[in-house]
Every structure is written in C-alpha cells, then in structure tokens.
Amino acid sequence: MPEESTVGGIDVDVLAVPPRVALTGQVDCDGARELSNVLRGLLAMGHTELVLDLGRVTGLDPAVPLVLADVSSRGLELRLQNLPPALQELLHVEAS
C-alpha cells in the first residue's frame, strides 16, 4: 500500500467567487515560493480577495506568513478558512 505524501500541494479554483486556494500537507520553502507565484498571479488577473483553505495543512515553512503579508500589502484580501489551532498561533490570528 503506498504511503500518503506529506509534501504540500496547492489547489486553485479561480471559478469560485471569490477564488479559493487550498493548501495541503507540509508547505515547505518551495511551496511558499509557489504559493507566492499563485497569489501574485491572481492579483495580476484582477482578483482582490480570495479564500485560503488551510484545513489540510500539516506544517508551514516560516516563509509562508511572509508571503501572505506581502500579497496582503499589495491589496489582496485573504479570508483564512479551516485554520487549525497550531497554525492560528503561527500566523498570529484568532479564530472567527
């Protein structure tokens, strides 16, 4: 039986309103770079808000909060969804 991968993935649904980006697994430095490219691409397409689903994330590289702060400062409103308690602490946010 194959083992489940813990490497992070990014799933983007640009047809959702607002667009939805779901992260899965362990989001490492390369994943943070890919996330930055995805989010900047959505900004370039004219999107100003999106839902970021973190419900299936097992870990985040320290670069991820910096990526989120960067795109936020560029005008992208992020709605965090399914945020596990450990990630709330890492991202310095409170559950809503």
Image (cartoon, rainbow, N blue to C red):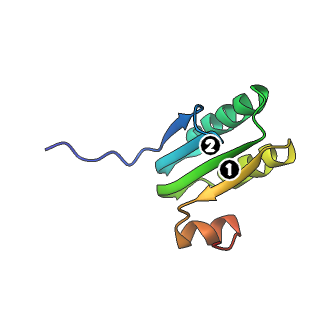
**Number of disc labels:** 2
Q: Residue at x 47, y 44 (%)?
A: 8
Expressed as whole percent of the image width and height from the top left, the position of residue 88 reads 62, 69
Q: Residue at x 42, y 44 (%)?
A: 7
Specify the quadrant of the image occupied by residue 13.
top right
Q: Residue furthest top?
A: 45
Residue 32, numbered label: 2
Expressed as whole percent of the image width and height from the top left, the position of residue 61 reads 59, 53
Residue type at numbered disc 2:
Ala
* Observer-nearest of 53 and 65: 53
Local crowd size for mark 1, using a 10 Å CA cut-off: few (<14), some (14–19), many (≥20): some
Expressed as whole percent of the image width and height from the top left, the position of residue 53 reads 55, 52
Is 75 above or below relative to 14? Answer: below
SS assignment at label 2: helix
SS assignment at label 1: helix
Q: Residue furthest front?
A: 17
Q: Quadrant of the N terminus?
A: top left
Local crowd size for mark 2, using a 10 Å CA cut-off: few (<14), some (14–19), many (≥20): many
Residue type at numbered disc 1:
Ala
Question: In whole angstroms, how far apart are the C-alphas of marks 1 and 2?
Answer: 6 Å
Q: Quadrant of the C terminus?
A: bottom right
Does residue 59 appear to the left or right of 51 in the view shown?
left
* Observer-nearest of 29 and 36: 36
Expressed as whole percent of the image width and height from the top left, the position of residue 79 reads 68, 55
Residue ID for mark 1: 63
Earlier sequence position, callout 1 versus callout 2: 2
Q: Residue at x 68, y 50 (%)?
A: 63
C-beta proximity under 8 Å, tags 1 and 2: yes
Specify the quadrant of the image occupied by residue 94.
bottom right
Q: Residue at x 55, y 35 (%)?
A: 12
Does residue 55 appear to the left or right of 94 in the view shown?
left
Is 67 above or below relative to 13? Answer: below
